[in-house]
Structure formats: structure tokens, C-alpha cells
Image (cartoon, grey):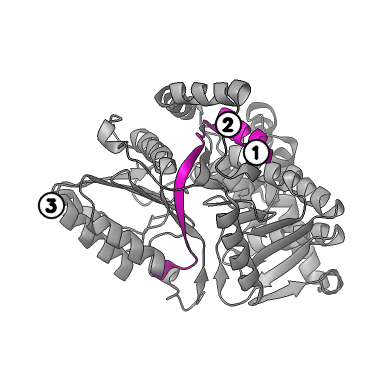
């Protein structure tokens, strides 16, 4: 009776899409007790009223700038420093209207492919901070790297620098309150994103803040896949070398990252921060890279990052290069990839050869077969663990950030990506992809079809449940 009542709730009250509804019905009826518990943890559809309030606030903050850019696109047109970017104006406009993602062309980009160099640069920039340091991370570890970061933040707080640290309550659930004690005593501010009211228990496994942002003095911005922990330095015995993509930005894109940080902070904190001019300093930048910072999550009406991914893929004429640790696409994304491959575009997908979440990995493998039959080339990264989330199209445009290519990133988590319109930066990312191919093994259609029967069975089960992974 409990299962039937819960099924009625799922079908008639949750208003989910059909694939998600059927997946939950399978769980409830085949795992009566376990399914009920899983639904309590994973299936709750929290009210979005509060989330949409964030988007309204974001609209108010930059409304004038957005309206001006819309007017330029519709009437006067936009002068592109890289003239070849004019062909992507419809994509830029879509991100502007859907995600309120302002387009700036005065940016510089530094690319990191592993944690040691990224954290060395981040710590160096934080040491030179004069006004503020703002950080959001999904995972924070109480290890050598985490403690080193806390020591530096504490020292800067004592100097009078405003320090704000936002971490996700589930991603960093192993942290004790003592970890931040010295920073708080020095005047730093720390908040957990959506913590549980009951200690050690947090049933809000959905709607997590998966973003990784660092903004220093409104001048330097960091965005990408690297969390704070020694495994991201390649020191984990389980994963070994950790291959990721993280960006260091200067220019107008950093101000958009700053606005996103303040919105997230004000959602999580009982002490909201006003949008002071000191957080948005006016500087003259010499960069020439066009960038939009696109955010998505439960606070938005559209799946902005997924839509931008699809728009990129469908714009491709020659190549689409994708890297992701988790590939559990919905029908729209996998259809876009198939269409590109069937149109003669060279589509290459790179995923890890070793999983960190086995069930998700089985679901990933189930989708690979569909792509292989369409002409997509799939490569398994074998040097270590591949955690990069990047797409490069035709060596002209690219994206890197926090969003995986799965339903959780597209619908349930708060994510942020930098969309880059520049042939030089996209070319660098394309060369990095080509270098990574040297550490890959190609998974051919012939080899895929020879996989054991038990593996096919497990993949089929994972595929059926993929809408709720």
C-alpha cells in the first residue's frame, strides 16, 4: 500500500518527465523497502520558489547590462575582436537571454591540466590579495592541501582581507567544524550549502552546489573541475594521476563569476552580502578572448549548460572533442552527437578507463554502443583518472567548467561553465586533447560487441535507471 501511494505521488504530484517517472516506478516496485528509502534521499523535488528568487535577483543585478547587449545584438550588431566568432552570435545570444550570461571580449585565459600548477597559482594570487577572497568548492578535504589553504586564508583574514568560503554540505560532509575554527576566529566567514538540521544526516542529496569558483579582488577568477584535496594533486593510491581542466581568468568574465558567488552566498548565508562596488572593480584589461560564464541548476527555468552543449555540437562543421568523467546523457544530447557524426563531423569522446562510481560507469558504457554505431570514436583514458569537463568544436570555440555530461549536472546540481569564443584558446585545448589521446585506448565497435553477457545485463539495468542517477 505504501508503494502504491508513493507511486501515485511520483506520477501525479512530482510532474517529472516520463523517463524519470518510469525509473522511479521500477525502483519502488522491484525494491519495495530500499526503493522507498532511496526516494526519500534522492527523489524529493524541493520547492523551487526560493531558487527562482535567486534568478530574479541575478536578473535585477545585471538587467541594464543585459538589455544593452540584447539591443546591440538586435540592432547595431557586435564588433568581434576575433571576426570568425560572428558565426556563433546565435549561441552567444541564447546564453545571454537564457542564462543572463554577459559576453565580454577583454579576457585572458590560463589553462591548467593538473592540480599542482593550479593550486600553486591560486595560493600565489591569494597571498597577494588586498581586498577580498571568495571561494566556492564542492569537496574540501582536511588533508595537507586543505590545511595549507586554511592557514593562508586565516593569515589573510588577520591582515584585514575579507574572506568568504562556501562549501557544499554533502560534498564536504567529512569536514569537522574545527577545520574552519581558526579562519572564523580571524574574521573569515564560512557557510555550508544546504546543511542538514540533524548532524551527520543530510537527505538533500539533490540540489548540491557542484561549482568550483575562486575570485580574488575581483581581478582573478578560477573555474573548472578541481576540488580541494590531495587526490586532485595525483596523490591518491586509488586513482593515481589526476587529469583535470581548470582555468585562470582575468577580464570581464571574472565579474560575472563574482555575481554568481554573491548569489550563492546569499542563498546559503543568514548574513547576505550587498553588491559593493569594491567587488566589481573597474579595470582596463588587455585581453582579447570572448567569454560567457553560464550557470545552471534548480534555480533556472532552462537547462542552460546542456542547451549550450547541444548548440555547440550542432554548430560543428569538422570536429567535436569531448572529455567527461560521467557520460549519462538524455535523449537530446545523444541525438545531437549522433547527428553530428552522421553528418560527417569527426566526433571523439574521451572517458576514464577506471570508474570512481561503478554504477554510473556501467550506465556510461551502455550509451557508448549507441554512439559507436553512429560513427563516434570513443577513447578510454588510462594514465590515471580523467575528471576534465571540456568540449572543443572546430578548434574555434570551447567550454570548460564543472558540469558533467549527465542528468545530475543538467537538472539537479548547481553548475557553472566558461564558454570561450577564441581560436587561440580553443586551439590550445584541442592540442591538449590530442596529447591526451596518447594515453588512451580506443574502444572500437567490434570490441564493444564482444563484451561478456553479464556486463551487457548490468549495463542494461544501469541504462534503465540512468534518468535518476
- Establish if 205 lies above or below 118: above
Q: Nearer the viewer, residue 407 or 435?
A: 435
CB within 8 Å, label 1 to label 2:
yes
Position in image of residue 390 (x %, y %): 59, 56
Residue wearing tag 3: 158
Task: Determine whether, in the image, residue 410 is placed left or right of residue 163.
Answer: right
Per the model, the C-alpha gap separating discs 1 and 3 is 48 Å
Per the model, the C-alpha gap separating discs 1 and 2 is 8 Å
Inspect the magenta stretch and tell me whether residue 8 lies in it: no
Q: Nearer the viewer, residue 369 or 383?
A: 383
Q: Secondary structure at mark 2?
A: loop
Q: Is residue 388 something that shows in the picture? A: yes
Q: Which residues are magenta?
A: 87-116
Residue wearing tag 2: 78
- Establish if 117 lies above or below 101: below
Task: Determine whether, in the image, residue 5 is placed left or right of residue 345.
Answer: left
**For residue 149, what is the image quadrant?**
bottom left
Q: Earlier in the sequence, mark 1 or mark 3?
A: 1
Position in image of residue 34 (x %, y %): 60, 51
Residue wearing tag 1: 86
- Residue count near mark 1 (Cα–Cα under 10 Å), binned few <14, some 14–19, many ≥20: some
- Establish if 357 lies above or below 217: below
Q: Earlier in the sequence, mark 2 or mark 3?
A: 2
Q: Secondary structure at mark 3?
A: helix
Position in image of residue 136 (x %, y %): 37, 48
Inspect the magenta stretch and tell me whether residue 95 lies in it: yes
Task: Determine whether, in the image, residue 86 is placed left or right of residue 103.
Answer: right
CB within 8 Å, label 1 to label 3:
no
Q: Earlier in the sequence, mark 1 or mark 2?
A: 2
Quadrant of the rendering where the N terminus is positioned: top right
Amino acid at each position: 500500500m505504501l508503494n502504491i501511494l508513493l507511486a501515485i505521488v511520483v506520477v501525479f504530484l512530482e510532474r517529472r518527465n516520463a523517463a524519470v517517472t518510469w525509473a522511479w516506478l521500477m525502483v519502488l516496485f522491484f525494491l519495495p523497502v530500499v526503493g522507498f528509502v532511496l526516494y526519500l534521499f534522492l527523489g524529493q523535488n524541493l520547492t523551487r520558489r526560493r531558487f527562482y528568487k535567486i534568478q530574479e535577483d541575478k536578473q535585477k543585478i545585471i538587467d541594464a547590462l543585459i538589455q544593452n547587449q540584447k539591443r546591440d545584438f538586435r540592432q547595431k550588431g557586435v564588433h568581434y575582436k576575433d571576426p570568425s566568432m560572428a558565426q556563433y552570435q546565435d549561441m552567444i545570444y541564447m546564453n545571454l537571454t537564457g542564462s543572463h550570461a554577459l559576453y565580454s571580449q577583454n579576457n585572458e585565459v590560463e589553462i591548467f591540466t593538473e592540480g599542482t600548477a593550479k593550486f600553486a597559482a591560486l595560493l600565489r594570487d591569494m597571498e597577494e590579495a588586498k581586498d577580498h577572497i571568495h571561494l566556492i568548492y564542492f569537496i574540501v578535504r582536511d588533508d595537507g592541501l586543505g590545511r595549507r589553504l586554511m592557514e593562508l586564508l586565516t593569515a589573510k583574514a588577520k591582515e584585514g582581507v575579507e574572506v568568504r568560503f562556501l562549501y557544499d554540505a554533502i560534498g564536504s560532509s567529512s569536514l569537522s567544524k574545527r577545520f574552519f575554527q581558526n579562519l572564523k576566529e580571524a574574521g573569515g566567514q564560512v557557510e555550508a550549502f544546504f546543511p542538514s538540521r540533524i548532524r551527520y544526516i543530510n537527505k538533500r542529496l539533490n540540489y548540491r552546489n557542484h561549482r568550483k569558483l575562486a575570485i580574488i579582488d575581483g581581478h582573478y577568477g578560477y573555474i573548472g573541475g578541481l576540488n580541494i584535496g590531495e587526490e586532485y594533486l595525483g596523490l591518491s593510491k586509488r586513482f593515481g594521476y589526476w587529469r583535470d581542466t581548470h582555468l585562470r581568468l582575468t577580464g570581464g568574465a571574472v565579474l560575472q563569476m563574482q555575481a554568481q558567488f554573491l548569489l550563492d552566498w546569499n542563498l546559503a548565508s543568514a548574513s547576505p552580502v550587498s553588491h559593493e562596488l569594491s567587488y566589481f572593480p573597474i579595470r582596463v584589461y588587455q585581453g582579447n578572448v570572448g567569454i560567457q560564464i553560464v550557470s545552471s541548476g534548480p534555480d533556472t527555468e532552462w537547462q542552460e549548460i546542456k542547451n549550450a552543449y547541444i548548440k555547440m555540437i550542432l554548430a560543428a562543421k569538422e570536429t567535436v572533442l569531448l572529455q567527461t568523467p560521467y557520460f549519462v546523457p538524455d535523449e537530446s544530447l545523444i541525438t545531437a552527437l549522433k547527428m553530428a557524426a552522421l553528418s560527417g563531423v569527426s566526433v571523439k569522446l574521451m572517458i576514464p578507463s577506471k570508474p570512481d562510481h561503478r554504477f554510473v560507469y556501467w550506465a556510461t558504457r551502455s550509451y557508448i554502443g549507441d554512439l559507436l554505431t553512429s560513427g563516434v570514436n570513443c577513447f578510454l583514458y588510462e594514465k590515471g583518472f580523467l575528471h576534465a569537463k571540456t568540449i572543443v568544436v572546430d578548434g574555434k570555440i570551447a567550454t570548460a567548467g564543472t558540469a558533467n555530461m549527465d542528468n545530475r549536472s543538467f537538472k539537479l546540481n548547481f553548475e557553472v561553465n566558461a564558454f570561450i569564443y577564441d581560436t587561440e584558446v580553443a586551439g590550445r585545448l584541442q592540442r591538449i586533447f590530442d596529447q591526451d589521446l596518447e594515453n588512451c585506448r580506443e574502444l572500437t565497435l567490434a570490441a564493444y560487441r564482444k563484451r561478456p553477457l553479464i556486463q551487457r545485463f548490468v549495463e542494461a539495468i544501469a541504462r534503465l535507471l540512468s534518468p535518476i542517477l
